[in-house]
Every structure is written in C-alpha cells, then in structure tokens.
Amino acid sequence: MSLRRLSPREYLVNLAGVLVSMPVYSRREWARRPDLDAFALRRARDMAVWAEAKVPIYRELYGNAGVQPNTIKTLDDFRRLPLMDKDSVRAGYPARSVAEGIDLRRCLLSTSSGSSGRMMTVPHLADRFWPYLVSGQRMLRWATADHYPFWYRQAYVYTSEYPLLRVPGLYPMKFIPTAADPERVLEALEALRPHILHTYPTVLRDLVALSPTRMSALHLRGASVGSELSTQSERDTWAEILGIRVCDEYSTEELGRVASQCPQGSYHLHEDVVLTEIVDEQGRPTSEVGEVVGTELHNHAMPFVRYRQGDLARISDEACSCGRHTRLLTDLVGRRNDGFLLRDGTKLSAGFLLDVSYRAILGLAEDMVSAYRFVQKNPDGAVFEVVAGTAWDERSAGLIKAALASELPPALAISVSLVPEISRSAGGKRSTVVRDFAQ
Ligand SMILES: [Zn+2]
C-alpha cells in the first residue's frame, strides 16, 4: 500500500493510541476464548450497526434482507447478516462505500491491486491508525520468538513507506525501497545491520538466491514476510540458512492483519483486529476449507462487515503449544486462480511451483541468479524468467531447465529466458508464479 505521511496532530494522537493500547493488546493475546469471542462480537456488532447507519451499500443490503444489526446478541445472530462482496464495495466507491460524513482528506488512502489485478482504494482515518501499528509490533515480536526489545533495528524493504510512528530510540525502523537489483538491497542491509527483516517473500527469495553466505552473515534475529505467497518449506530453508525464524503473515488491503505465524509456526488469527469466518459456496459457515469472510473491527471510514475476501482457507480450534487461545488459520490455499493449469486439466498449485523453483535455484552456485519468476504462457508451456547474477554462465540455463523438468509433468514444455529485470505491479506486489493466459 502507498500512504501519505501523518500530520503532526495525527502523529500525536496515534502515538498516544499506541502507548495506551500496546499493553492492552499484548495482554489480550493471552485471553481465554470466551473473552476473545465476547470482544470480537461486541466490536463486530458495533461495526455492523455503524455500517447500516452510515454506509449506503450496507443500508441497502440489510434493508433488502430485512435484518437489523442492532438486534444482534450472539455470534450466530451476527452470521445471519448477508455477505458483502468486492464488486459492490468497489462500484460504490466513494459515495456509497465510505461512511457519510467522513472527510477523505482526514484519511490515509491505501490503493492496491488485488489478485484480480483490479485496483481497490481503502481509506483509514489518519488519527485512528494505531491498531495497525500495534498489530504490526505483535507480528514482528512473534517473528523474533517473543523477544523484540525496543532497541532492535528493523529493515523494512517494501515498495513504499508505511506511515510509521518513529519515536527516536523506540523500535527503530529503516525503510529500504525494493530495487530491481537485489544487490542494492543487500548492500543497504549490510550497511544497516538490522535485527529484523520485514519484506516481501519475492525480495527474500532473491536475496537468498543471490548470496546465502552474505545473508547469513547479517546475523538477523528474525524475519517476517507477507503480502505475497511463500511456502513453509521455502521459509524453513531460509530459516536454516539465516539461523532464525522466518514467519509469514496473511493480511489484505481491506481487512488488515488477519493472521500471522506465532513462534511455533501456527497462523494465529488476530481476533481483536478482524473477526474471521469461513463459509462454503452457499455462504454458510463451514469447518472445512472455504472462503475467508472478515469483519474489520476498527475502520469506521470504510467498514468491511462480513466481507468476502475471496481467498480459501480453514479455521481450526486446535490448541497451539505456544499457549495462545486465538484460533488458527490452516490450509491457507490462497486465491482460487493461483498456479498453472495444463491442457489435460492438471492443476499445479502456486505453492508447489514455488517449491520446485527454489529447489532448482538452490542447486546452483552462488550469484548465478539474482531474481526469477515462473510464467505459464499457454496450456502447454511455461517460461522461467531469470535475471542473471555475476556467476551466470552458458551452463546455467540448462541446469535450471533440467531441475525444473525433473519435478514437473512432461506435458509442460519449459524454457529458461534471461530478462533485464522483474518489475512490480502498480500496487507494489510481485508474483513469482504467474499464469499469463485466459482460461
Ligand atoms: Zn501459537
């Protein structure tokens, strides 16, 4: 997301919010289930009441369905509210999706392209931004195995700067812009010597491909990746190379931070930030894999209530050995249209293709590849695009091709192609696995 900076007044209000709420949020992390449910229900109900009163698309949706959010008493009542979808929110922006009386000049506007490539703008009240900052601190604390002293330096390698609160000496953070050339990012990291790396998996993937030795020599204490897909086995490999934990997070532009990995590696829902549900194709609650539906509990500028996020996942009640009672997001299988689709109907998931790709790269000498992307161009063929590293030579393409072919169906013709750089979308995201043809 790309956001403007905070004004001095917004900064002070957020700073006060962070200082007051950080201990509350830290304690709530360990709350018992009934307390977590009661908190989420109260906030979600209030948000639904607010949305019905102030936001035309919800007023119309609830009016047509004959439901009244102010009569909600239980989570089952709440689940009877009709679902809101992406197209209605996007088509209604801003007049019918933003709460009446909200001045967009007082908001941080975050615009991104989702998995569909269509842009979505989400305003947040600029002086109510602290819940996102507090949940970010929580996420990084988990990535450092619950040890995140206030003096740890964070390297934040992203496409654009987050409007972070910088208090001198407190959780110092340095923004490093993503660059087409990973060497520049690595040099910036070597100059900064951060304790924590917070970035896209595509960035960490390139850095580790470029030089495992130099990455390991950074002596990081934790790393957090998000916004894009990475797999557990990739993260385990990175963790081993770097000698730390590499935690993933699941967040969306609309709902914010939905879940992130705890020190034990489980994806805990941030139940005090988003009320997350899973529904089946008919929109009914399910304990199986289904669509993620979320209610964001803080954004009064543009409410998202029982909002169909479109990703597929499962929620589990199983206990995590870390001792937190928040429910776990399991089987996050991502967007429906991810991965490759072959002519005979075979589907290769994006996660599997990421694993096959990084195994092919790790089999090479250091500095051979500095960035890569796997693009399916048609039902019969895919191109592995590579930005050459300094050690690239005439054998490299053949090695990559052979490694990929050994794990993929013969029906998929694979070629390796050198490209000058791999660019990001206007919204900042980059995918390492891309299906680039209409179904
Ligand atoms: Zn846990």
Image: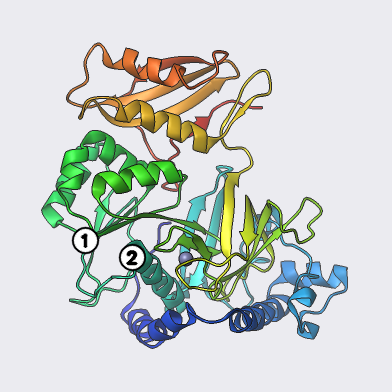
* Residue 95 in the image, given as x and y percentages of width and height: 65, 66
Q: In the shown orientation, is residue 174 left or right of residue 251?
A: left
Horizontal and vertical percent for residue 299? 55, 73
Specify the farthest residue to the left.
191
Q: Nearer the viewer, residue 86 or 356?
A: 356
Location of the N terminus by quadrant is bottom left
Residue that carries the numbered disc 2 in the rendered image: 145
Q: Tell me how far mark 1 sits from mark 2, CA to CA.
A: 13 Å
Can you tell which quarter of the image residue 354 is in?
top left
In the image, is residue 267 above or below residue 301? above
Residue 397 is left or right of residue 434, and the answer is left
Disc 1 marks which amino acid?
His
Q: Secondary structure at mark 1?
A: loop
Mark 1 or 2: the one toward you: 2
Q: Quarter of the image containing the C terminus?
A: top right
Residue 421 appears in the rendering:
no
Q: Nearer the viewer, residue 375 or 63?
A: 375
Residue beneath the point at 54% across and 13% down: 410
> Residue 178: x, y in percent?
29, 46
Q: What is the number of the mark on residue 195? A: 1
In the figure, is residue 368 to the left or right of 126?
left
- Decide: few, some or many residues near mark 2? Use Cα within 10 Å; few <14, some 14-19, many ≥20: some
